[in-house]
Amino acid sequence: MKRSKIHIMGASGSGTTTLGRALANYWSVPHADTDDYFWLPTDPPYVAKRAEHERLHLMRSLFLPRDAWVLSGSLFGWGETVIEQCDAVIFLILDSEERLRRLEKREDIRRSDARFDEISWNRFLEWAAGYDNPAFEGRSRAGHERRLEIVNKPVLRLDSAMPPDQLVDAITNWKPSF
């Protein structure tokens, strides 16, 4: 696959940001994460959402006009117009236990910060654990699969248990039909 406009999505902890950075570095193109646009910059982070129209305005003015880029994170429910501008979608799938282990490992670093909010962390972990439950009302694999069925873009599904360099190889060797 040549340098393009790629959206990498999956459950929290599946490695979308890690793969997004690796692929963007490989192609020498910009990378952004949807969280960069979804959340207002706060300290601590992730406590105040940016208004949807502001998210989209920022993306349209700062990121989307480029010839090629990699965007990681979830857009469903607010960024469908961004998905329309993508050339392809990469959907990362990972065993639930491994995802939750990765999330715990990621948060171990933040736990040493005096501002760490254990209650918010536990709520987030409960939300993240619901992803593989088809009845879960938040962001879920079933919801992602339903939305991917109607996306008019090539979709590559990858098991993100593979190391990032192997995932990059799988993408760069992919021959999607545009």
Image (cartoon, helix red, strand yellow):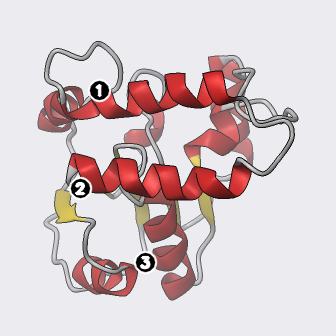
Question: In the visual, does 84 lie left or right of 158?
Answer: right
The residue under label 1 is 130
Q: Tell me if residue 90 can be seen.
A: no
Q: Earlier in the sequence, mark 1 or mark 2?
A: 2
The residue under label 2 is 94
From the top left corner, tell me how far across and down residue 134 is, in percent.
13, 23
Name the amino acid, label 3. Arg
Name the amino acid, label 1. Gly
Q: Earlier in the sequence, mark 2 or mark 3?
A: 3
Q: Residue at x 82, y 47 (%)?
A: 113
From the top left corner, tell me how far across and down residue 68 is, in percent.
52, 68
How far apart are the two marked residues, 1 and 2, measured between alpha carbons?
A: 14 Å
Counting the numbered discs, the total is 3
Viewer-nearest of discs 2 and 3: 2
> Helix or strand or loop: what does disc 1 sit on?
helix
Q: Is residue 156 above or below residue 164?
A: above
Q: Is residue 59 above or below residue 119?
A: below
Name the amino acid, label 2. Leu
> Helix or strand or loop: what does disc 2 sit on?
loop
From the top left corner, tell me how far across and down residue 171 is, in percent.
27, 76
Q: Residue at x 17, y 59 (%)?
A: 157
How far apart are the two marked residues, 2 and 3, measured between alpha carbons?
A: 25 Å
Task: Identify which residue, 59 or 100, lies in the foreground.
Answer: 100
